[in-house]
Image: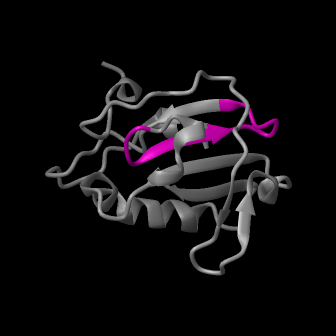
Amino acid sequence: MPWYTCHMAATPSTMLPLGTAAPPFALPDVVSGETISLESFADKKALLVMFLCRHCKYVQHVKQALTTLGQDYQDTDLGIVAISANDAAAYTAACTPDFFLFDQQRKLVYRGQLDASRPGRSAHQSSPEAQSGL
């Protein structure tokens, strides 16, 4: 079974169709208090929208990988935003972590999981498809 058909959480994702335009959002940044919106990333060639829940065991499992992802793509043409799962309605995210990658025209080109690893497995399994998507 391809890695992208496996679901990270016990709740299967309810995915937006590929090609869908990025739904607008405007939410407060938990660090600065400033409003972050879809337009905040207008100068980026791609946008990764991650839906997370800090206490979710699956999010905790990939916490270091998320940190590395943010560091690896800092100061690049990829915008990255993490949104609370409570604010996921427009994206139809049903589980955490859920990832939505949009191209420069803000059309959905990937949706799904970070990688194929799960809690209880000691190592993250890299996925060539996920890496090529970024």
Q: Residue at x 39, y 58 (%)?
A: 53
Nearest the eye: 68 or 31? 31
Quadrant position of residue 55: bottom left
Nearest the eye: 26 or 42? 26
View extreme (bottom): residue = 32
Depicted 67 relative to depicted 86: above or below: below
Nearest the eye: 120 or 31? 31
View extreme (right): residue = 43
Depicted 42 relative to depicted 106: above or below: below
Q: Residue at x 79, y 47 (%)?
A: 45
Q: In the visual, does 37 lie left or right of 29?
A: right
Q: Is residue 96 magenta?
A: yes
Q: In the visual, does 79 lie left or right of 42?
A: left
What x and y, as percent, mark residue 87? 53, 51
Task: Give the residues in magenta.
Answer: 94-108
Q: Residue at x 68, y 38 (%)?
A: 102
What x and y, as percent, mark residue 3? 36, 28
Q: Residue at x 23, y 46 (%)?
A: 118
Quadrant position of residue 5: top left
